[in-house]
Image (spheres, helix red, strand yellow):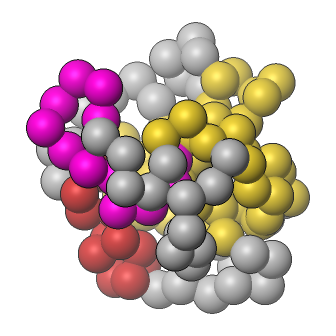
Amino acid sequence: MERKIVTVTIDRKLGSKHPHFDMIYPINYGYIKGIMGGDGEEQDAYIVGVDTPLDSFTGEVIAVVERFNDCEEKWVVAQTGSEYTKEELEKLLEFQEKYFQHEIHVMDK
């Protein structure tokens, strides 16, 4: 997958509580309308590099989290031109990805 520009609709804002688990979102999290994920729902996406709660965000897909024990992958979206290492993304996404066997694939610019 190449880097592409997408718009994420945020349904779990930074600082909000997960609807089913005792977890507070340390980043914005949402979905991309019109792109279907492996679970039959719209594609989920993490927003990194923004420290305020958002309603929506347009940015670049910089990485994909491939989950081995789940039916879907998560996209990582940041401001266009942003660069993160795999290790930096592991730390940012650990709050949720620690529950899954996964691999983060960082995309080249």
Question: Residue 28: x percent and y percent?
Answer: 51, 55
Q: Nearer the viewer, residue 59 or 63?
A: 59
Q: Which of 58 and 16 is in front in this view?
A: 16
Query: Against 56, is 4 above or below?
Result: below
Q: Is residue 46 magenta?
A: no
Quadrant where the image shows the N terminus: bottom right
Q: Is residue 22 magenta?
A: yes
Question: Residue 106: x percent and y percent?
Answer: 55, 72
Q: Can residue 44 be seen in this view?
A: no
Question: Residue 80: x percent and y percent?
Answer: 81, 77
Q: Is residue 37 visible?
A: yes
| Residue 47, image quadrant | bottom right
Q: What range of the chain is rendered magenta?
A: 18-29
| Residue 14, image quadrant | bottom left
Is residue 21 rendered to the left or right of residue 78?
A: left
> Residue at 78% of width from left, 28% of height from top?
33
